[in-house]
Image (cartoon, rainbow, N blue to C red):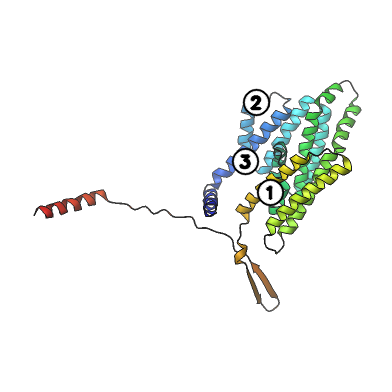
Amino acid sequence: MTGLLVAKQILLTLYSKYEVYITPFLKFILALVSLLLINSRIGYMDSIDKMTVVLIVALMCSFMPMNFIIVMAAVFIMLHLYAFNLECTIVVGVGFLLMFLLYLRFSPKDTLVILLLPICFLLKIPYAVPLAMGLVGTPVSAVSIACGVIVYHMLHFVTQNVSAIVAMAEEEQTVKFKFVVDGLLNNRDMVITIVAFAVTVILVYLIRRMSIDYAWTIAMAAGAVVNITVLLVGDLMFDTNVALVEVLLGNIAALLIAAALQFFVFNVDYSRTEKVQFEDDEYYYYVKAVPKIVVARPEKKVKQINSQKGRAVSRNRSAHDNR
């Protein structure tokens, strides 16, 4: 355990020292992964489905605010859909517009959520995001999580219905619009996922704010249980064909990720908890103080030996012995 604490302290020290270089690099990696996934899933426009274009745009994103990455990801999606089908482009564009208005109004600082959630869906661990945001975010983070879920399901709908959309090429435009809109609005799996993730975020936030021992651990466990319960209840009510094994394994992985986050953000020693009471002219104060677990980084001591001085002393000793 001490070794992990020392490693944590070293990582935090390195990040604070080289933050000006590490932050742009992380933005570059996030933008690169996001754009590559978009190209791999809906790569209908050849002019932007090139590694050189992706690298240039990702490099631009590394020096811009985080919201710029979302804008560029939306631009890539819209361009690919425009090359595929005009009706899909319009419907998804309206969806993006509404999401941006909600996102910018309620949770403009949760950019990372909207980008990470579709990636986590592809990795089969989307349940880690609501747990993490319940621990470090606020209940308003449910808005960004809902936006991320909608983005994933919009792209999933398009990729899953390519043949059906192509087959409707000769149909009237209103029929195409109706098919796309109904496919998105009647997606019960998306609605249940949004509800489950929103309930998880709010519950985890409320529990981890309580003044009880091991509040974060209890919040993580309760959030995972509630997440599974809501998804299974939704499956029973609306027959969404939830994969039980995938949900269980995904929530176990989410708990491990949340535990790692707790180690870096909220690592405390409840065995040394202190309760303090004091007063001033207007109030009595009852304070519960829980110390953080901090290990000082070991300092290396280097002992320098002057070799020339050592040889001089050796020669003096030899001359003295010859006498």
At label 1, counting other C-alpha atoms closer than 10 Å, the crowd grade (few under 14, some 14-19, many 20 or more) is many
The quarter in which the N terminus is drawn is bottom right
Residue at which label 2 appears: 50
**Residue at the front extreme of this rendering:** 245
Number of the label disc, if any, that sits on residue 27: 3
The numbered mark, 3 or 2, whose residue comes first in the sequence reads 3
Tell me, yes or no, whether the two marked residues, 3 and 1, touch with CB atoms within 8 Å. Answer: no
Name the residue type under label 1: Leu
Tell me if 274 is positioned left or right of 312 in this view. Answer: right
**Nearer to us in this view, 293 or 12:** 293
Q: Quadrant of residue 277?
A: bottom right
Residue at which label 1 appears: 255
The x, y position of residue 23, in whole percent, is 59, 44
Tell me, yes or no, whether the two marked residues, 1 and 2, touch with CB atoms within 8 Å. Answer: no
Residue at x-position 84% and y-position 46%: 233
The numbered mark, 1 or 2, whose residue comes first in the sequence reads 2
Q: Quadrant of residue 99?
A: top right
**Nearer to us in this view, 17 or 228:** 228
